[in-house]
Image (cartoon, rainbow, N blue to C red):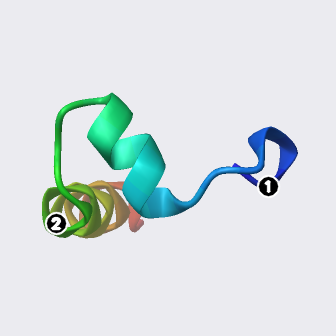
Amino acid sequence: MKNFDISLQQACEGLETSVEKYEEAKQQIHKISLP
């Protein structure tokens, strides 16, 4: 996002989601990718 000069909140708004939902999804992906 630094390359696009926008914040996480702005990116989430553009995707019609919230930062909280982004963080939840990120944690779920991390749990799945653990060996």
Residue 25 found in image quarter: bottom left
Residue farthest right in this picture: 3
Q: Please give left or right for residue 6 compared with residue 28 in the image.
A: right
**Vertical position of residue 34 compared to residue 29: above or below:** below
**Vertical position of residue 15 compared to residue 26: above or below:** above
For the residue labelled by badge 2, is the local secondary structure a helix, a strand or a loop?
A: helix
Q: Residues within 10 Å of mark 1 (few under 14, many from 20)?
A: few
Specify the label residue 18 is tagged with: none
Dot 1 amino acid type: Lys
Could you tell me how far apart the alpha carbons at marks 1 and 2 are, in whole angstroms? 21 Å
Query: How far across and down, in percent of the image, does residue 26 sit?
Result: 32, 61
Q: Residue at x 77, y 39 (%)?
A: 4
Dot 2 amino acid type: Glu
Q: Please give left or right for residue 13 compared with residue 7 in the image.
A: left
Query: How far across and down, in percent of the image, does residue 18 sit?
Result: 18, 55
Which part of the image, by quadrant, shows the C terminus?
A: bottom left
Please name whichever residue, 30 or 11, is drawn nearer the observer in this view of the structure: 11
Lower position in the chain sequence, tag 1 or tag 2: 1
Query: How far across and down, in percent of the image, does residue 33 sit?
Result: 39, 56
Total numbered labels placed on residues in the image: 2
Query: How far across and down, in percent of the image, does residue 28 sit?
Result: 20, 61
Q: Residue at x 48, y 60 (%)?
A: 8
- Viewer-nearest of discs 1 and 2: 1
- Give yes or no for contact between labels 1 and 2 (Cβ–Cβ under 8 Å): no
Task: Find disc 1 in the rendering and name its residue.
Answer: 2
For the residue labelled by badge 1, is the local secondary structure a helix, a strand or a loop?
A: helix
Q: Residues within 10 Å of mark 2 (few under 14, many from 20)?
A: few
Specify the label residue 24 is tagged with: 2
Q: Residue at x 30, y 54 (%)?
A: 29
